[in-house]
Every structure is written in structure tokens, then in C-alpha cells.
Image (cartoon, coloured by chain):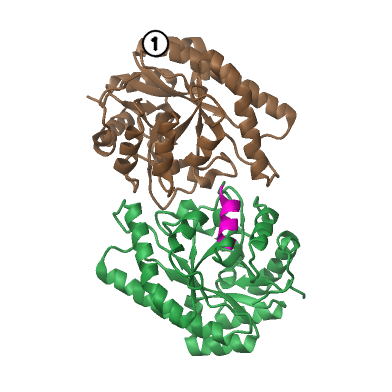
Chain colours: A green, B brown
């Protein structure tokens, strides 16, 4: 089977597969890249994960995920920062092991309101503080911290950063090599400012990752699991993808889906569907056929 | 029982009550105002509804709702506009019948993407076109059209207007007496721009209604029914309410809750809870105790 050369499978799309199986089905379907997750890497062990990635011949398009920076409590905050330091090291090691064109990009989901708190501005300030703390170690490791704006329906329990513009403001004082943003269609498609903020992200050199999945209603009972294959919902992938391309993004494009029905299917079949969905809904809008490091 | 003089019960909070019962329990709990809905008014008949409202001694703080302007099809679009013209007339008649301080404010939920469409900008353009069409009749009737930005999780099926800033942009070319916006805490609390957009709404004379309800997670399986009494969630009502007051809003403040558990309770008990919740979570942040027409 032939897959578009810039398609990357984010591992979350086949969440129940082990790392070895995920690499196997992704390479087997002809993809060139994969976005890895920390949990399956931890399960396999970092050294063995790096060896498996190298053997797969795949590029790593991003590593998911660090973040969860909003704790007020000092000890909890310290644990979060320590964990992110480990994630930075893992990102560097895996990106160095993946095929040429791998990107040392650590995706950050910044965290929601701490239990009992109603202080959104305070939580946002702590995210900024954490990024400033991590910028040095990230630079030293050659890793880009990629802040992901999540859909506003996740603001209280998952991410107090809700728009692309807000994520760009957040990283604005940091070096673009060290701090960028993720553009994820599911999270930002509704935003009346999305196109101008994509332009801005390009101008400011901040687009560290482009992730695609689709939106349709009614949402699943668990709104976290409401993502769909590109084309199965109402997002105009042409409008967004052409703009991301025009903004200068040249990397792999990840399909990242959280969906219990899709997770229940055989990983190999899911990857096959992903290749087709991407070909139909996203690929026609990509200006460049090959990934350019 | 004593209720804060600026508390208004939006009728949706006791959705299963008839108009007569809603007016009865609202006035009976000592409130001065109510936000009415079209469906129970239609059920009672407009003339009888006006008589009931007059007899209740209550102000009408707003009338819900018009809108749903996004149809592409000509006939469907015409039906929508005709229906909104009727809603404008109803708003004027009921506001004239309610106690002094009643406001002829028609709340508009603008509509989502038409079936099969992925064209968000097109849908937004049609909303603007509809507002321009309705502005003349609204002005003639002395009615303010109040565009409500809904939470972005409703963008595809309910409202392609998702932020306060966007709603202000939308009405910017129309006379503020004819076109304003609704500030609803549930819909806008997450927005990093919310405070500056509240300031702007005040400066531009656009705050036609202020509605409060709370957010907490996990969301209900039907995300439409995920609203809670002020204080039962994570919204900082002080931060938002003080800003709305500072922006010059002097009207009644509506508690509007869609929640199946609350709908299942006795309306009288719900109103009693609303009075208490409002006293605790919202009233301390109101600068003015009495509503000023």
C-alpha cells in the first residue's frame, strides 16, 4: 500500500497497540513517520524503544506529551517540571534515533485548573513560568517545546490554553527554536481568528507540528473521545491545510484520533483507513509532496 | 423570601413549567424580573401571555430566542427571517406589557453549519446578512437584537458565532440600539480575551443582556445540558461580573440553566436555589443594587 510521504500516524490513533506493533503496522502500511507517546515508550523502555524506532526506518514527527504545569502546590509543581525534563531528554534521544527528518518536538498539553481553583489567569501564569524554566534545558537538548491549544471545552480539566493566538502569545518571549506551537484542526477549526493566527505562527516561525482529525456532532458522551478520521466530519481541511502550507510548514502531518470505536479495531485496519482518509481529505491540499527537514 | 433586586430567572431554568407557573413561582420568590421563551409563550398564546406577564408585576429582562440564520436554501432562509420578524413583534409586545424596566431584547442564537456544509465563513456571512435584513424591522419595533456567542463546542450544530469579540465584530456596522450582544458566562468564561472584549462591549454600548450559569466537568453526555447554578462549578463570577458592571451594564442579570436534573425538580424549589446561588456567587460583585432602565 502507498501512503502519502508526509503522512505521519500519531500513535494515539492506535492507542491499544504496543510500540512494537505500532511501528510495525505504520511502516508496513508504507508511512514514513510516526508521532510517539510516552506511555508505550515507557512500557517498552527507552533504550529498547529507540532501537525499535531505528529498526523501523520511520521518522519521529513529534513526541507526546509533556505539560500539566498548572499545579499550585510546590511539590506537585516540582514533580511536573522534573517529569518534563525527563520528557525533553526522551524526545532528544528518540529524535536522534529515528530516520533522517525526525523532529525533536515535545508536544505540551499545559493542564487545566487545579482542583478547587477558579483562577484561570493564575493557571496561565504558571504555564508561562514553567515554559521559561524548561526553555534552557530544551535548548541544551535541541528540543522544541510545542504548546498545544486545546478546544475550549477542555479548558477546566486539561488545558488553560485554548486558542492558537493565545499559544503564540505564550511562547512569544522564547526563542522559536525552543518554543513553538501545535496546530491541531480539531482544536482550532472553530476559531474566527484561526487563519490570521496560522499566518502569524508561520511569520513567527512557530509551527512545530500540524495534527489533523475531524469534528462531528453529536459529540461522544466522553468529549475527549470525539475525534474522527479526516473527512468524516465538518472540518474544511482544505481551508486550514493550504494556510498551514502557505505559512511555511514543511513537516510531516500527523493524524491523531481519540475515539473508542477506532481504538477497538485492529491497528492494521485503522492505519489503512488513515492512509485513505488522508489521501482524500488532506493530501490534495499539501503543496509539497515530500517532507523537508 | 427576598431575592436580589437585579436577579432575573431565565425561564429555561424551569423549562417544564408553563408560562403561568413560571411567572407565579418567579414572582412568588420575590424576584423582580424574568427572561421569557417563545415556546411557552406560544403555548399560552401571545395575548394571554402578555396579560399574564402584566398581572405578574414582573419585568421582562429578555426574550429567547430568535436566530438560526445559516440556511443556504432560499425557502428555508425566508422561513427563518419570517419567524424572526414574528419574534421581533412578540418581543416588543411583551416588553411593553411587562413592568417598568422591561427590556425589548431578543436573544439570537445564530445557527450552526447547514447539513452537509463545511463552509464556516459562508455561514457567518449569512448571519450578517440576516442581521442587516432584520435591523430595520427591529428599529421600527424598538427591539434590540442581541447576538449570543455560544461556547465553541456548539459551533457546528448551534452557533457559528463563538466569541464575544466575534459577536461584537458582527454587529459593529449596526446601530447599538438595534444590535447588541449577550454576555453569557458559560459560553465565554474560557476566552483569554474575555475581559478586554467585555470592556469593548461596554465602550461600544452593546451589552444587551448578562446571563450567568456555571461550568463543571465532566460535562454531561448531552453537552447542551451541562450548565449549573452559579457557584457549583469553576467559573469566577467575581472576575466577570465586576467587569460587566464596570462596562456600564445596569440591567437585570439572568440565571439561565439547561440541566436535566434541575429540570426534573419542582420549579418552586429551583427558583429558591437560584435566589440563594445568585446571592452567594454573583450578587456580591454587583455594584448597583437596583436595576436602572
Task: For residue A222, say whether it is visible.
Answer: no
Start and end of the magenta stretch? A193-202
Question: Depth check: A254 or A240 in front?
Answer: A240
The part of the image, by quadrant, that contains residue A135 is: bottom left
Question: Depth check: B75 or B203 in front?
Answer: B203
Identify the residue shown where x is 71% and y is 77%: A29
Question: Counting other residues with Cα less than 10 Å from the Cα at mark 1, is it few (<14), some (14-19), or many (20 or more)?
Answer: some
Task: For residue A91, say whether it is visible.
Answer: yes
| SS for dot 1 | helix
Q: In which quarter of the image is the C terminus of chain B?
A: top left
Identify the residue shown where x is 65% and y is 56%: A240
Is B262 in the magenta? Answer: no
Residue A86 point in image, percent of width and height: 41, 80
Q: Name the residue under label 1.
A: B54
Q: What subunit carries mark 1?
A: B
Residue B285 point in image, percent of width and height: 26, 36
Amino acid at each position: 500500500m502507498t501512503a502519502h510521504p508526509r503522512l505521519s500516524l500519531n500513535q494515539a490513533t492506535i492507542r491499544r497497540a504496543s510500540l512494537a506493533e505500532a511501528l510495525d503496522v505504520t511502516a508496513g502500511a508504507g508511512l514514513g513517520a510516526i508521532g510517539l507517546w510516552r506511555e508505550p515508550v515507557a512500557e517498552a523502555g527507552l533504550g529498547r524503544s529507540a532501537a525499535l524506532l531505528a529498526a523501523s526506518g520511520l521518522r519521529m514527527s513529534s513526541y507526546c506529551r509533556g505539560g500539566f504545569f498548572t499545579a499550585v502546590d510546590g511539590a506537585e509543581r516540582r514533580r511536573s517540571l522534573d517529569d518534563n525534563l525527563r520528557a525533553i531528554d526522551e524526545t532528544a534521544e528518540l529524535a536522534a534515533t529515528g530516520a533522517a527528518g525526525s523532529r525533536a518536538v515535545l508536544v505540551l498539553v499545559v493542564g487545566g485548573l487545579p482542583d478547587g481553583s477558579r483562577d484561570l489567569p493564575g493557571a496561565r501564569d504558571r504555564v508561562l513560568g514553567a515554559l521559561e524554566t524548561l526553555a534552557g534545558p530544551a535548548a541544551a537538548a535541541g528540543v522544541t517545546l510545542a504548546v498545544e491549544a486545546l478546544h475550549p471545552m477542555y479548558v477546566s480539566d486539561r488545558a488553560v490554553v485554548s486558542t492558537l493566538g493565545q499559544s503564540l502569545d505564550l511562547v512569544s518571549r522564547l526563542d522559536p527554536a525552543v518554543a513553538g506551537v501545535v496546530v491541531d484542526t480539531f482544536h482550532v477549526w472553530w476559531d474566527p481568528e484561526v487563519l490570521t493566527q496560522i499566518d502569524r505562527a508561520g511569520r513567527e516561525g512557530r509551527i512545530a507540528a500540524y495534527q489533523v482529525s475531524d469534528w462531528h456532532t453529536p459529540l461522544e458522551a466522553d468529549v475527549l473521545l470525539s475525534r474522527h478520521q479526516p473527512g468524516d466530519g465538518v472540518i474544511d481541511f482544505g481551508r486550514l491545510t493550504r494556510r498551514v502550507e502557505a505559512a511555511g510548514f514543511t513537516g510531516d502531518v500527523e493524524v491523531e484520533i481519540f475515539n473508542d470505536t477506532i481504538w477497538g479495531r485492529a491497528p492494521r485496519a485503522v492505519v489503512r483507513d488513515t492512509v485513505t482518509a488522508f489521501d482524500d481529505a488532506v493530501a490534495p491540499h499539501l503543496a509539497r509532496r515530500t517532507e523537508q527537514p
